[in-house]
Amino acid sequence: MLTAICTLFEKDYHYGVGVLVNSLYNYGFRGVVWVGYRGALPPWAKPLQDGQGYQEFSVAEDCVIRFIQLNTPKFFSNDKPDFMLQLWESYCPEVEALFYFDPDIVNKRRWDFYVEWVNRGITLCEDAYDYMPANHPYRLAWKELAERYGMKCQRELDRYYNSGFIGVKQNQKSVLLLWQKLLETFESAGYISLSDFYLALNRYPYFQSDQCVLNLALTLSCEALSTIGRMGMDFGGASLDIMSHASGGAIKPWRKQLIFRALNGEAPTLTDKAYWQHTQIPIQLYSRSQYLRKKIALRCAAAIGRFIRRS
């Protein structure tokens, strides 16, 4: 099966993009990673070659990143379905399955696993807040709103999925079209603003982010799902060794002052540790001295964390 990966970034999230790509490559991914960006390109992405609507960076043998500059006013979290559909329409129509990863995710599993996984259904991982029963007031409000626009729920779900990762085969892209339609319909009606992360702030209290709209789309769709629990993203400090996600308001690993945080009672997370395993090969994101200092800080912070837990 021909697969591709995509992500979106701006500002210092290029560090996360580099580590995401390194971790995917180191676990066997070969192919194209499509990266939508706003602002400046990563300083490590040199040299670049011009392509048809993109700039290409060679990561290593049989693996490239193709950067596409985006001019959307949307907050990038709200642009995920648009970007994936744009890729299929204009850049890689031959790809059979497309995977989106947030740029603060580190992969921890062989790529073959993902290829087999997406053959079983749309691939999703539960959020840290994983349980949302079918009779939850938010779900009932979403259902009522969808019905106002002529859309009926096709199934009831009790689990709440994180929108930082999704894998879709091209013959299942109707779920992306539905996700996109919901976002655009609700913005046009004044319920949400796609330029904000908290898209319903002071407008409609039942939507927190694009994630809520994705979860509504899943109930309106009949497409098969294949899902894993929150341990799939290392939430709650437990791991299935699939991926690790510094989601939401978590301090991103590239920004974290590890020793300072440890002294304040916050030991390095599984994501922090996974991040620093993949910063140098094949893309080198830090100088050797910077990397060694961070590795020492990581070990010291972990030791401080163990001491505080035992005391």
Image (tube, rainbow, N blue to C red):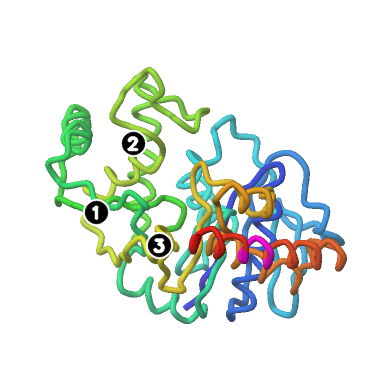
User: Which of the two labelled residues, at mark 3 and mark 2, occupies the earlier sequence position?
Assistant: 3
Q: Mark 1: which amino acid?
A: Arg
Residue interval drawn in magenta: 299-303
Snapshot quadrant of residue 142: top left
Q: Residue 200: horizontal and vertical position, in percent? A: 39, 26
296 horizontally vs 191: left or right: right
Q: Residue 265: horizontal and vertical position, in percent? A: 55, 50
Foreground residue among 111 and 309: 309
Q: Magenta segment, principal secondary structure?
A: helix
Separation (CA) of disc 3 from disc 2: 18 Å
Q: Give residue 168's mark.
A: 3
Give the residue pinned by disc 2.
182
266 horizontally vs 61: left or right: left
Separation (CA) of disc 2 from disc 1: 20 Å
Residue 134 vertical placement versus 294 (above, below)? above
Q: Residues within 10 Å of mark 1 (few under 14, many from 20)?
A: some
Q: Are marks 1 and 3 in contact (CB under 8 Å)?
A: no
Q: Residue 144: horizontal and vertical position, in percent? A: 16, 30
Q: Say if the magenta span includes residue 248.
A: no
Q: Mark 3: which amino acid?
A: Val
Give the residue pinned by disc 1.
159
142 horizontally vs 282: left or right: left
Q: Do the residues labelled 3 and 2 touch (CB within 8 Å)?
A: no
Q: What element carries label 3?
A: strand
Foreground residue among 134 and 275: 275
| Residue beneath the point at 31% across and 68% down | 121
User: Which of the two labelled residues, at mark 2 and mark 1, occupies the earlier sequence position?
Assistant: 1
